[in-house]
Image: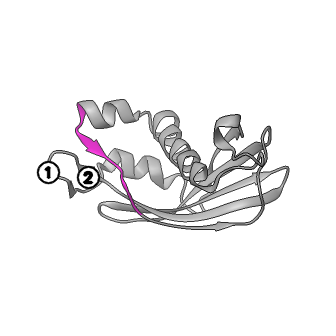
Amino acid sequence: MAAYTYRNAVMFQHCDPAGIVFYPRYFEMINEVVETLFRDALKWPFAEMHVRDRTGVPMGRIETDFHAASRLGDELDWAFTVTRIGGASLAARVTASCKGEARLTADLTLIYVDLDAMRSIRWPEDKRAALAQFMEGTP
């Protein structure tokens, strides 16, 4: 399995008056993909990560290319692929498409942090292994 996949519908709340996705809403959707990946694929919901474990994965960097507009009612197919796992960081590519048409590509870096100290910390080995299944080129 090379990519984690997720689908969501473009809802009224995501759109501007023209009925297309207002670009900042894409960043909320990207976060939804990340949060769902951690909950469903890693069995580590943000509620446990943040409240119980006092850790988090803030965005350290994001670079996004917008390819085409998404409209109210579109179903977006998202793919999250890990491109690099560092000691405390994770680089990934997130793409969105609709019916095969590219809508956006985002290259991002998540940093694993201790929420109390607000310092980066090393990924737990079990989480590192779970994330590795989504590594680019993994069968």
Membership of 58 in magenta stretch: yes
Reading the image, the residue beneath label 2 is: 113
Q: Residue 85, image x and y in percent?
A: 41, 63
Q: Tell me how far mark 1 sits from mark 2, CA to CA.
A: 8 Å
Dot 2 crowding, Cα within 10 Å, few <14, some 14–19, many 20+:
many
Quarter of the picture holding the C terminus: bottom right
Q: Quadrant of residue 19?
A: top right
19, 43: nearer the viewer: 19
- Identify the residue at image location x=31%, y=46%: 56
Mark 2 element type: strand
Disc 2 marks which amino acid?
Val
- Identify the residue at image location x=22%, y=39%: 54
* Horizontal arrangement in the rendering, residue 89 relative to residue 64 (left or right): left
Tell me which colouring the rendered structure shows.
one colour
Membership of 79 in magenta stretch: no
Disc 1 marks which amino acid?
Ala
Q: Residue 136, image x and y in percent?
A: 58, 63
- Identify the residue at image location x=35%, y=62%: 89
Furthest residue in direction front, as rendered: 17
Number of on-image labels: 2
* Residues under numbered marks 1 and 2 in contact, where contact means CB atoms less than 8 Å apart: yes
Q: Residue 59, image x and y in percent?
A: 40, 57
Q: What residue span does the magenta drawing correspond to?
A: 52-60
